[in-house]
Image: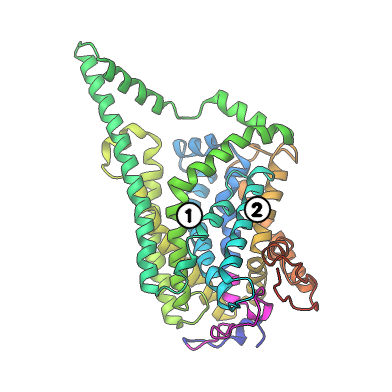
Amino acid sequence: MDINNPLAYPLGPTQQSGINENVETETARPVSVAERIKTIDIIRGVALLGILLMNIPGFGIDWSISDAIRRGLHNTADFYTMGVINVFFEGTMRGLFSMLFGAGMILFTMNKKEKPEGITVAELYYRRLLWLVLFGVINAYVLLWPGDILFFYGLCGMVLFPFRKTAPKWLFILGFIFLSMAALKTTLWFNEERGKRKAYLEAIAIEKSGKKLTAEQQAAKAEWLEIEKRRPDQERVKRNVNKMRSGYGTVFTYLIPNNSGGETWGTYHWAVWDCIGMMLIGMALFKLGFFSNKLSSSRYLMGLVVGYGIGIPIGYFMFTKGGLGSVNIGPYLDQYRVSHWVLYDLKRVFLSLGHASLVLLVFRSGLVPWLMKSLASVGQMAFTNYLMQSIICTLFFYGYGLGYYNHLKFHQLYYVVGAVWVFQLIVSPIWLHYYRFGPFEWLWRSLTYWKWQPMKKGGLPSEGGT
């Protein structure tokens, strides 16, 4: 079967995935090109490119610009761009990427056979994730990208191994339990903020009545006033821009506290619930044949209609009511008892399914095989392309590169995104024409198996030794 020709894949639930799930190899080794599932690579390529839609503001502008757009006129190119990104893509590409990470965990283990005298599958699996954590540290502390996801994926992926043989039903249940915990944490935070707002309003009412405030009431008033000062401070903005336009040493010193704090805070408050929840759902979808193109076209059409039919309205509601309404935090807390962000993961799940279903339907149509081939190559080199996005964007925006930080308008950032997409869509298939892996995939595999993997096509297959 020609894995580079989408028309070579028969349609319907009996479609071949490109891998025999019942075959066990004699020795542990990386997945070969012939064993790859093309549709998973394609969807991963879409998710990888889509992640840059959300990351680019973090690379290129101070967050005060986003705040100014939400507070300003709502008929500008910047506002429309922000609206489209928030409604259609906010969190969904990362969600899709997380789902595929869960699917990839199963793919990694399913072609490996335990041997009494050899390295265990579990050891290979956890070694692989520990190296991923290290690559995440390098991305955050050497490449200086504060929004690194690899560190969290490496940590959260360690939870998945015991669930690799769990039935899809239970994986869905566990996944939604984790996502529900994220919604619960959001609700608890929102209630805490509402309590602070209530205490402030009570203190103001007492003060207006001519009574003297107690020490506790004065503290409540001061605390809320500090919260309202979270709006962009022009001195802070100026200092941030100057630092980010400086040399590597200055940017490094400036970002390290933020990056280390973000990883510590994010592991407990965000990643455990967000990443693991989506990974478990991805494992369930893979077992049902969703990502490997095994379902009928009518099922994917239903996934598209339901995913977009529910996800897009929720996304619009969250942006117009939550994203814009919460700009003025006081009135927002007064008006709503529950934050709109409790719907965040629900939107992400449905939109992620919608995006994946659309990609699979386009793949089946055979309309753009050249694009499908390029996306598959981008997905096969997702690790390299993700790190390359950090390298390209930091060199373009930071001061030790071209120094374009905070020079572009919000909508102009997406010209850079388009340029990076074109570059990766062109370079990835050319690279894979000559080599088995992307350069960082090759390094990761070599470290995982503790043996240099053959890089050029035509080399001997790896025996997966340690």
Could you classify mark 1 by the number of other residues whose Cα lies within 10 Å: few (under 14), some (14-19), or many (20 or more)?
Answer: many
**Closer to the camera in the image, 56 or 447:** 447
The quadrant in which residue 243 appears is: top right
Q: Which residues are magenta?
A: 14-42
The circle drawn on residue 135 is: 2
**Where's residue 246, x and y in %?**
72, 32
Type of secondary structure dominating the magenta stretch: loop
Quadrant where the N terminus is found in the figure: bottom right
**Closer to the camera in the image, 167 or 298:** 167
Report whether 149 appears left or right of 445.
left
Element assignment for label 2: helix
Could you classify mark 2 by the number of other residues whose Cα lies within 10 Å: few (under 14), some (14-19), or many (20 or more)?
Answer: many
Report whether 397 appears left or right of 44.
right
Sequence-first tag of 1 and 2 = 1
The residue shown at (40%, 68%) is: 171
- Does the magenta run of residues contain 298? no
Check the image and report above or below for 204 versus 102. above
In the rendered structure, which amino acid carries the disc numbered 1? Gly
**Closer to the camera in the image, 365 or 12:** 12
